[in-house]
Amino acid sequence: MWRSLFIEFFADIGKQKLRSFLTLIAIAWGTLSVVLLLAFGRGLGTSLMEGMLGAGNQVIVIYGGQTSMNYEGLGIGRSIRFTEDDVKMLDQAIPEIQYSSPQYGRWGATIEYGEVRTNTYMEGVNPDFQIMRTMYNVQGGRFINEKDVDEARRVLFLGDDIAVQVFGEEDPIGKEVMLNNTPFTVVGTMQSKMQTSMNNGPDAERAIIPYTTFRNIYGNRNVGSILIRPHDPSQQELIKTKVTNLLSAKYKFDPSDEQAMPMWDFIEMEEMNQKVATGLEIFLFTVGFFTLMIAGVGVANIMFVVVKERTREIGIKLAVGARKIHIMIQFIFESLFISFMGGFLGLAVSTAIVYAVLALNLGESEGAGQFLGKPEISVLAVAVTIGVLALIGLIAGIFPAMKAAKVDPVVSLRYE
């Protein structure tokens, strides 16, 4: 049975060479559109998420603000400022917190090395900051550690861009620089990373020192912010509620006063970015789907032509006892085969394009290449595309097949 189906199919294709060729190209083009749109859409979503995580991975940043509500006889406009002790209190009182760090900051920090002099943003933090802000060190160096903090050492960790500005091609590790006229030893530099969300500028251009060293040199009593990260992102709201209750009770402000204690929640941002990326994929798939459906019209057209040309043959088959279901299966099979032939051709070309783009390493470049240079063909995208091709083949074949099955054998024998 299958052998006869294939023989008849290729015989029909041979009679309609140009029409069949154009239909295959249309199906291939539609498949190419669907796969490439989904691949680049997913790559864009992944790059956006990677860029956001470059500024903070599941981190909640707590700032001191200004009261906007009266509370227990205290007026509006009071400044709320937090200290290192508050970080320790939160760690002890909220077991759901996995990582935390105080964060001091200072603009205009001057770094001098030999004849080179440049300004940057400097922060005083603890070792947990590395994980929360994904500031991983290059091989041969390190981030600040607990001993650096305990002994208030004058050690310095540099972003990758500022390290190049200061040292050029020279290895910075172990070199001594003057940071605001104070000698510091460089212990590590940051691996290059994508960062789309900024907090006082990109991490690639900042200098990191132990928070105890920062406090001893500059005498700050209040931290600029507090960073915390939960064990489980699902505990985010619980942690925020506990933090708000503890700090509002200590500093006497209304727990519902968001201006007294602003929070920047990367977990919420991650969820929002994920929804945006999913919406983008759905939109791009819809565009590609309709392109593929238009190509399906060509499949239906060629099948109607085949039915018309084989009317006498169909009538003879019915006259000698062929069942209508067998006639329908024949034409549905041919429609599906055309769809899958064109589909797999389009899939092969789109896969080649994706791998060619990946080979260019555009993701390592600046600008649009960072976001569009990492297309990704997922198993789901391929499965959905094959499903759409099957649907198109079925829809495009079933109506011509029904027409063929309704042929009157007596009338068909007189058909010219």
Image (cartoon, grey):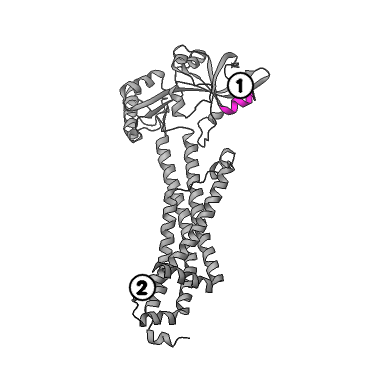
Residue drawn at 55 percent across, 71 percent down: 17
Camera-side residue of 239 and 305: 305
Q: Residue furthest top?
A: 151
Q: Is residue 162 magenta?
A: yes
Quarter occupied by the N terminus: bottom left
Q: Position of residue 312 (x, y in %)?
A: 44, 82
Q: Which is more N-terminal, label 2 or label 1? A: 1
Residue 326 - label: 2
Task: Provide the secondary structure element on which disc 2 rests.
Answer: helix
Residue 8 versus residue 132 in the image, above or below? below
Task: Report how far apart the C-alphas of labels 1 and 2 lie in the structure.
Answer: 76 Å
Magenta-tinted stretch: 159-168
Instruction: Name the kind of residue labelled 2 in the image.
Output: His
Front position among marks 1 and 2? 2
Residue 79 - label: none
User: Which of the 4 image quarters holds residue 121?
Assistant: top right
Q: Residue furthest right?
A: 115
Q: Is residue 30 magenta?
A: no
Task: Provide the secondary structure element on which disc 1 rests.
Answer: loop
Camera-side residue of 107 and 210: 210
Residue drawn at 49 percent across, 33 percent down: 54
Can residue 73 be seen here? The reply is no
Dot 2, how many residues are within 10 Å of its Cα: few (below 14), some (14-19), or many (20+)? some
Instruction: Name the kind of residue labelled 1 in the image.
Output: Asp
Residue 59 versus residue 156 in the image, above or below? below
Dot 1, how many residues are within 10 Å of its Cα: few (below 14), some (14-19), or many (20+)? few
Residue drawn at 54 percent across, 63 percent down: 25
Please state the total of marks drawn on the protein image: 2
Q: Position of residue 228 (x, y in %)?
A: 39, 27
Camera-side residue of 359 and 233: 359
Residue 171 - label: 1
Q: Are marks 1 and 2 in contact (CB under 8 Å)?
A: no
